[in-house]
Image (cartoon, rainbow, N blue to C red):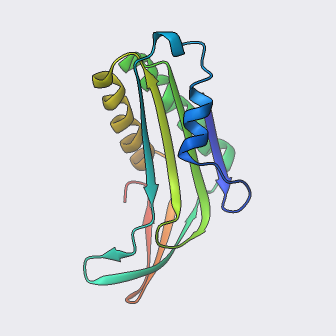
């Protein structure tokens, strides 16, 4: 399991990096699928143009631990072998990567469900704060938004 909370420009990890890392798992011979997700900044929202997004967390270590706990629960629930997560914080613009996930599992159904559950739980349960700056002003969005 890899979980990293990275300040933008501190390090650059891509989906390809997560895939290459997950393929080094001792469970690769038992695996039949890798699912990935890359969440990016959307530039258009209904009725407005988003100029930038500032993503923060009040405690990087706690945030990392919270994600690790979510991953352990999901691995047990769905029986997948590995889940790697990278979440960036900092200032972002349209198309910038914010959130990367890679799942290694034996079969596609449970691996896909594990991916969806990871995405939703990190979005709704982890302490991130987004400040969206658009042509209509700024808006702060807490976890779950």
- Point out the residue furthest to the top here: 30
Q: Is residue 135 above or below residue 66?
A: below
Q: Is residue 136 above or below residue 28?
A: below
Q: Position of residue 49 (x, y in %)?
A: 37, 83
Residue 36 picture quarter: top left
| Whether residue 136 is visible | yes
Q: Is residue 137 above or below residue 143?
A: below
Q: Nearer the viewer, residue 44 or 22?
A: 22
Q: Nearer the viewer, residue 13 or 129?
A: 13
Q: Position of residue 68 (x, y in %)?
A: 57, 32
- The residue that appears at 45% across and 60% down in the rendered structure is 40
- The residue that appears at 62% across and 22% down in the rendered structure is 24
| Whether residue 127 is visible | no
How many numbered markers are drawn? 0
Residue 4 picture quarter: top right
In the rendered view of the protein, which quadrant contains the N terminus? top right
Q: Along the horizontal axis of the image, is 132 left or right of 63?
A: left
Q: Position of residue 87 (x, y in %)?
A: 57, 50
Q: Position of residue 23 (x, y in %)?
A: 57, 25
Q: Along the horizontal axis of the image, is 86 left or right of 11?
A: left
- The residue that appears at 47% across and 67% down in the rendered structure is 95
In the rendered view of the protein, which quadrant contains the C terminus? bottom left
Q: Is residue 120 above or below residue 9?
A: above
- The residue that appears at 38% across and 35% down in the rendered structure is 115
């Amino acid at each position: 399991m890899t979980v990293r909370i990275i300040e933008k420009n501190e390090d650059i990890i891509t989906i390809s990096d997560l895939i290459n890392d997950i393929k080094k798992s001792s469970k690769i011979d038992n695996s039949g699928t890798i699912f990935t997700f890359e969440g990016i900044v959307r530039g258009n929202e209904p009725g407005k143009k988003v100029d930038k997004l500032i993503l923060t967390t009040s405690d990087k270590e706690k945030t990392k631990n919270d994600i690790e706990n979510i991953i352990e629960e999901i691995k047990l629930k769905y029986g997948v072998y590995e889940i790697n997560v990278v979440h960036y914080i900092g200032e972002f613009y349209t198309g910038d990567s914010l959130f990367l996930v890679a799942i290694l599992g034996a079969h596609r159904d449970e691996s896909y469900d594990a991916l969806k559950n990871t995405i939703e739980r990190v979005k709704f349960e982890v302490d991130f704060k987004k400040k969206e700056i658009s042509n209509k002003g700024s808006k702060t969005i807490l976890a779950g938004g």
